[in-house]
Image (tube, rainbow, N blue to C red):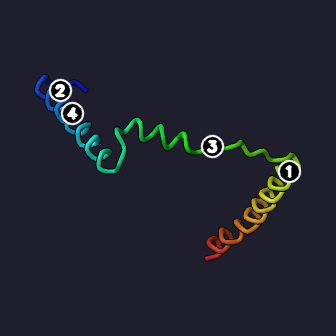
């Protein structure tokens, strides 16, 4: 995408306007700027621990899913047979 010089100037002006409005909003909400507000909220939250699933739990889930698939596959041919009979 190639922009003309007037389009680039307009884009730069809009970007400056957006940044000014974001700063004004941050001041109204009690923050100094967008970046400091984002870093402060990220610092307040502790890092989430990665959830680990045991091999037995994975096997149980996989077996249940295979059972659902088998049930759905066994039910699928019945409607197809009805269409041929008509």
N-terminal of the pair, mark 2 or mark 1, is 2
Which label sits on residue 8? Answer: 2
- To which quarter of the image does residue 33 belong? top left
N-terminal of the pair, mark 4 or mark 1, is 4
Q: Which residue is mark 1?
A: 59
Residue 81 place in picture, x, y as percent: 68, 70
Residue 63 place in picture, x, y as percent: 84, 56
The mark closer to the camera, 2 or 1, is 2
N-terminal of the pair, mark 3 or mark 2, is 2
Q: Which residue is mark 3?
A: 46
Q: Quadrant of the C terminus?
A: bottom right
Label 4 with label 2: CB-CB less than 8 Å: no
Label 1 with label 3: CB-CB less than 8 Å: no
The mark closer to the camera, 1 or 3, is 3
Taking the spot 58% from the left edge, 45% from the top edge, the residue there is 45
- How far apart marks 3 and 2 lie (CA) works out to 41 Å
Mark 4 neighbour class, 10 Å CA radius: few under 14, some 14 to 19, many 20 or more: few
- How far apart marks 1 and 3 lie (CA) works out to 31 Å
N-terminal of the pair, mark 4 or mark 2, is 2
Residue 23 place in picture, x, y as percent: 28, 40
Label 3 with label 4: CB-CB less than 8 Å: no
- Of helix, strand and loop, which one carries label 2? helix
Q: Left or right? Give the position of 39 relative to 69.
A: left
Q: Which residue is mark 4?
A: 16
Closer-to-camera residue (21/13): 21
């Amino acid at each position: 995408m190639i922009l003309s010089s007037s389009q680039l100037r307009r884009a730069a002006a809009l970007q400056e306007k957006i940044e000014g409005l974001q700063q004004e909003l941050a001041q109204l909400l009690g923050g100094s700027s967008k970046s400091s507000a984002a870093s402060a909220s990220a610092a307040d939250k502790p890092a989430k621990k990665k959830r680990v699933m045991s091999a037995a739990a994975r096997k149980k889930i996989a077996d249940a899913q295979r059972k659902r698939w088998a049930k759905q596959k066994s039910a699928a041919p019945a409607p197809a047979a009805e269409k041929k009979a008509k």
